[in-house]
Image (cartoon, rainbow, N blue to C red):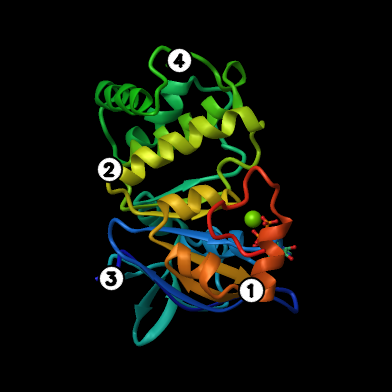
Amino acid sequence: MPILSVRGLQKSFGNFNVVRDVSFEVERGQKVAIIGPSGSGKTTVLRCINFLERPNGGVIEIDGERFGVRMTGGSERFESDASLAKKRADIGFVFQRFNLFSHLTALDNVALAPRLVRKMPREQALEIGRRMLARVGLSGKENNYPDALSGGQQQRVAIARVLAMQPKLILFDEPTSALDPELVGEVLAVMRDLANEGMTMLVVTHEIRFAAEVADRIIFMDGGQIVADGPPRQVLYDQPTDRMKQFLRSLSSDNAPTAGAPS
Ligand SMILES: Nc1ncnc2c1ncn2[C@@H]1O[C@H](COP(=O)(O)OP(=O)(O)OP(=O)(O)O)[C@@H](O)[C@H]1O
Ligand SMILES: [Mg+2]
């Protein structure tokens, strides 16, 4: 059974159909990258998966269970915010702009959700927090506030915060695109480690080289639709559409894929 199933997802803002009939699955342990031009609907798909954005149609299932909607007396109802918040705890979300609490230390940022959502005793949550900070290479930074950390370090705290909840699946929305170029590598290295450890990951990224190396599949979105979904080699090189070639050309040269790139 797939850990994530998205079927017929639709989302519009006013009259503008931003996501148009998007369907895909992610199996347990799979790494799937979503790429595509700006405005193609990538962020909206991620936000609809955990109902940060309420879809207009379609079905989201996490681990075989319907997400965001429950059946009562034969009709569908949106789940309450409280019930959604509880279920979201199983799905990590790493934002482009870290979204750490600025008034909390790195350690407290990581330990907060285990305490509040998982109702863990304080000492246990702090212990998990320390372990997760160590896992992303930030031992010694426990007491730093976010503004005393680099962007790369803040993003690693954000990843540690997600890991502390032992998620079934982590959604990443361009986790490195707000970073100075010299800080991108340290975040990608942590993501590579997670991938190697078998974490299930759905990653929106412009880091095509990373996607080609780490992802089992690449989904290419354009105009709110999936136009390609397959192994990296197939999607990027074997039969690239004109739009794909155009997209790959639009990427900066230090990020473009290497071997076999379409000319
Ligand atoms: N809350 C909103 N209200 C109105 N329009 C929105 C809203 N959120 C997104 N959109 C529009 O939906 C389209 C898709 O946006 P989305 O952020 O999903 O694209 P994206 O593929 O993530 O782009 P980028 O690569 O720039 O992050 C865009 O045209 C955007 O302007
Ligand atoms: Mg986006």
The residue identified by callout 2 is 197
Along the polypeptide, which appears first: circle 3 or circle 2? 3
Query: Viewed as shown, does residue 23 lie left or right of 102?
Result: left
Q: Are marks 1 and 4 in contact (CB under 8 Å)?
A: no
Identity of the residue drawn at 62% across and 39% down: 97
Question: Looking at the image, do the residues carrying marks 3 and 1 touch, with CB atoms under 8 Å apart?
Answer: no
Q: In the rendered view, tell whether residue 220 sits above or below residue 167.
A: below
Report x, y in % for residue 11. Answer: 61, 74
Amino acid residing under circle 4: Lys
Residue 241: quadrant of the picture: bottom right
Label disc, if present, on residue 141 of the rendered structure: 4
The Cα–Cα distance between marks 1 and 4, rounded to whole angstroms, is: 41 Å
Residue at 26%, 20% in the rendered image: 123
- Which x, y percent locates residue 239? 55, 75
Q: Which residue is mark 3?
A: 64
What's the CA distance linking mark 1 and mark 2?
32 Å
Q: In the image, 33: left or right of 160?
A: right
Q: Secondary structure at mark 1?
A: loop
